[in-house]
Amino acid sequence: MRTRQVSCPGGTLHTVAAGDTLYKLAKSYNTTVSAIQNANTGLDPQNLQIGQQICIPVPPVPGPCPGGTIYTIRAGDTLYSLARRYNTTVDAIQKANPGLDPRSLQVGRRICIPGSEPVSCPDGTLYTIKAGDTLYGLARRYNTTVAAIQKANPGLDPRSLQVGRKICIPSAVPCPGGSIYVIRAGDTLSAIARTNNITLNQLLAANPQIENPDMISVGQSICIPMG
């Protein structure tokens, strides 16, 4: 017996498998039994035949998604929230999924989330954002400034750092003729200045990234200028 060719423009062709019912298929494809029946004139829901092709009136799963992620839409998702979560843009997601209606995302539909563009960081450090990170904390840890990090990462929103996103931490403040010192527990800038026979003002001038002399952290690198 020759299989009848089923027309399904804009939908998904499904081959009936053992155990399939229209109710199960409707749930699986996030549609309704009546919508499937309307798309398949004469379909007998009580007599689905294994191997039979039927039209499911929802868009097919995405095609190739090189370098990206196949994502299944969940309740509450928006393209904006997905773009933020995956470090991409709404436009990039729409281009990767032609015909996707951002105003009507179907729970259960699979879409392609394109990979984020590679971060360029010559002479700096590629850092992966972790829970609790702030640009201020990163600037202190890497002996740089918030402004320098923002300049190295155009479009970065300091109020909404995405866990897992890679950013560029620019090179630390230079220390020509001096030495790099790593802050230890109990250190103060005044004590460090006295120990190295320099003034607190000289120490601060060599470390413009320090915005508050009373707020330094263990592990932070600073420049000790020549006395």
Image (spheres, rainbow, N blue to C red):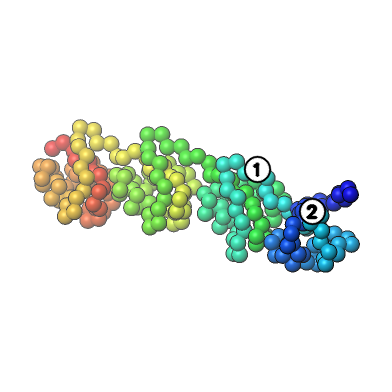
Query: What x and y, as percent, mark residue 25?
Result: 73, 62
Residue positioned 34% across, 38% down in the render: 171
21 versus 11 height, above or below:
below
Q: Does any portion of residue 91 appear in the rendered image?
A: no
SS at badge 2? loop
Residue positioned 44% across, 57% down in the render: 159
What's the mark number on residue 78?
Answer: none
Badge nearest the viewer, 1 or 2: 2
Mark 1 to mark 2: distance in Å? 25 Å
Q: Does any portion of residue 83 appear in the rendered image?
A: yes
What's the mark number on residue 64?
Answer: 1
Asked if residue 219 lies left or right of residue 128, the reply is: left
Provide the residue designation for mark 2: 51
Residue positioned 65% across, 60% down in the render: 108
Do labels 1 and 2 touch, CB within 8 Å? no
SS at badge 1? loop
Specify the amino acid type for callout 1: Pro
Quadrant where the image shows the C terminus = top left
